[in-house]
Amino acid sequence: MSQVHAGADPAERPDSGDDESTTQHAAGDAEPAADEATGENAATAEDAADAYTFDDLAVVMGTYNEEAAIGTVLEDIERVTDGRAKVVCVDGSSDRTPEIAREHGATVVEQEPQGYGVAVREAVLTPDRPVVVTTDCDDTYPMEKLPEFLELINEGYDVVSGDRLYHGAETMPGFNRFGNKAFAAIASVLTTERVHDTTTGMRAYRRELLHDIEWTENTGLSAELLIRPLMRGYEIREEPIPYGERAGETKLDPIEGGAAIAKSIVKVCLQERFR
Ligand SMILES: Nc1nc2c(ncn2[C@@H]2O[C@H](COP(=O)(O)OP(=O)(O)O)[C@@H](O)[C@H]2O)c(=O)[nH]1
Ligand SMILES: [Mg+2]
């Protein structure tokens, strides 16, 4: 069984009431994941030569009428990665979003708007780079964390998942915050691993994993992208991230979307359990 590794001391977690509620952080368990506390298995100088750089990184996103945010998001990626990350936008917009994306050198895949997961599945499968990072195109996710996400992949993790709830996610609408905590609780019970944020839009993945697993969910794709690898024994790391104020309007209806996500979590967990 794989373990979810916490990116910060679980004891310091603001919402941690007791030991049971904390993310496990196992020392000396199966390589290749390094243990942050001890530095065990940390990359050696020899490994560093094979380490992935920004030239191996793609940052991908679904974009749907995000002209209020896309300029900032793409500039942040460019600045943080020295313009070396490949950017893929799967776009269903009727505004200037795709033009702005092209002006910034992004690859734009045009697609009728069919929901979050249809776009993001296409986005994660498009680039031929070995490390793929997802983000929303709404300026809520910290592109400044890209170097750390890449570093954690270099340490051996298969998935690095940005945990918005660790720092409180004050900018998230209260209903969504409640829902996200509930999703994490349900997923933790069904996977028997403590996870803290199942619907985050910011994660890094090894490319092979994205192609080795069949993805079936739409609104629930983000949860699926965490749960299937977790239940198949991949090494997962949850890394605390700040979560910003959204630029532009949300594209997901909280009630309809929330119900779809809950359904996806139960379905995917049961499928993985009995596969
Ligand atoms: N291409 C495409 N992108 C979408 C669609 N639905 C949502 N998105 C994008 O997916 C990302 C997540 O949506 P968002 O509104 O931020 O959801 P929230 O974070 O739950 O509020 C954003 O970048 C949206 O533009 C869609 O149907 N097609
Ligand atoms: Mg968003």
Image (spheres, grey):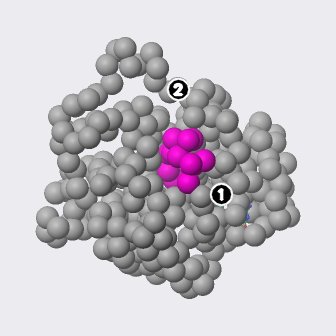
**Mark 1 residue type:** Val
Residue under label 2: 53
Secondary structure under the numbered disc 1 in the rendered image? helix
- Of 242 and 263, the residue lying toward us: 263
The part of the image, by quadrant, that contains residue 38 is top left
Q: Is residue 118 left or right of residue 53?
A: right
| Quarter in which the N terminus is drawn | bottom left
The response on whether ligand 1 sits within 8 Å of label 2 is no
Q: So how many labels did they put on this image? A: 2
Q: Quadrant of ligand 1?
A: bottom right
Residue under label 1: 120
Secondary structure under the numbered disc 2 in the rendered image? loop
The answer to the question of whether label 1 and label 2 lie on touching residues, with beta carbons closer than 8 A, is: no
**Residue at horizontal 25 percent and vertical 59 percent from the top:** 23
Place of residue 200 in the rendered image (x, y in percent of width and height, measured from the top left): 49, 61
* Mark-to-mark CA distance, 1 and 2: 23 Å
User: Do we see residue 82 in this rendering?
Assistant: no
**Residue at horizontal 60 percent and vertical 84 percent from the top:** 256
User: Do we see residue 41 in this rendering?
Assistant: yes
The response on whether ligand 1 sits within 8 Å of label 1 is yes
For the view shown, which residue lies furthest in the front direction? 275
Q: Is residue 115 magenta?
A: no
Label 2 crowd bin: few (<14), some (14–19), many (20+), radius 10 Å? some
**Residue at horizontal 29 percent and vertical 63 percent from the top:** 193
Task: Please provide the residue range marked out in magenta.
Answer: 202-213
**Mark 2 residue type:** Thr
Place of residue 231 in the rendered image (x, y in percent of width and height, measured from the top left): 39, 60
Place of residue 103 in the rendered image (x, y in percent of width and height, measured from the top left): 81, 40
Q: Earlier in the sequence, mark 1 or mark 2?
A: 2
